[in-house]
């Protein structure tokens, strides 16, 4: 079964549901899945992550044990 067929079957099942609470739960689940965590981060958090990725790509890494020493 391909993705389009699966979607159609899912819609058919949802159309036959009469339980309001269940429909609300499905709606909440779908809305949560659409939220990209990146957009939930502050600008400074996004910049720190981007900085870390750049450092990793350049080969700059810190041993986990060294990291623990640094933050404690």
Image: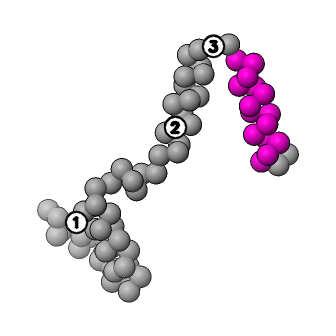
- Judge from the rendering whether residue 49 lies leftward or rightward of residue 32; answer left or right: left
Q: Residues within 10 Å of mark 2 (few under 14, many from 20)?
A: few
Task: Please provide percent x and percent y for residue 31.
Answer: 52, 37
Task: Of the two numbered discs 1 and 3 on the same chain, state the one appearing first in sequence.
Answer: 3
Q: CA distance from mark 1 to mark 3?
A: 50 Å
Q: Nearer the viewer, mark 1 or mark 3?
A: 3
| Placement of the N terminus among the 4 image quadrants | top right
Q: In which image quadrant can residue 9 be found? A: top right
* Dots 1, 3 in contact, CB < 8 A: no
Is label 3 in a helix, a strand or a loop?
loop
Q: Residues within 10 Å of mark 1 (few under 14, many from 20)?
A: few
Q: Nearer the viewer, mark 2 or mark 1?
A: 2
The residue singled out by tag 2 in the image is 31
Task: Please provide percent x and percent y for residue 33.
Answer: 53, 43
Task: Of the two numbered discs 2 and 1 on the same chain, state the one appearing first in sequence.
Answer: 2
Q: Residue furthest left?
A: 72
Question: Which of 72/4 is in front?
Answer: 4
Residue at 75% x, 19% y is 16
| Magenta extent | 3-17
Task: Of the two numbered discs 2 and 3 on the same chain, state the one appearing first in sequence.
Answer: 3
The residue singled out by tag 1 in the image is 68
In this picture, is 33 found above or below 39? above
Residue at 55% x, 16% y is 21
- Judge from the rendering whether residue 35 lies leftward or rightward of residue 19; answer left or right: left
Is label 2 in a helix, a strand or a loop?
helix
In this picture, is 40 found above or below 19? below
In this picture, is 30 found above or below 25? below
Question: Which of 62/53 is in front?
Answer: 53
- Judge from the rendering whether residue 6 lies leftward or rightward of residue 63; answer left or right: right
Q: CA distance from mark 2 to mark 1?
A: 37 Å
């Amino acid at each position: 079964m391909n993705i389009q067929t699966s979607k159609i079957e899912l819609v058919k099942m949802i159309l036959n549901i009469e339980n309001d609470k269940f429909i609300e739960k499905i709606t909440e689940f779908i809305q949560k899945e659409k939220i990209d965590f990146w957009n939930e981060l502050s600008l400074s958090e996004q910049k720190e992550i981007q900085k870390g990725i750049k450092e990793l790509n350049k080969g700059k890494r810190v041993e986990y044990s060294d990291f623990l020493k640094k933050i404690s």
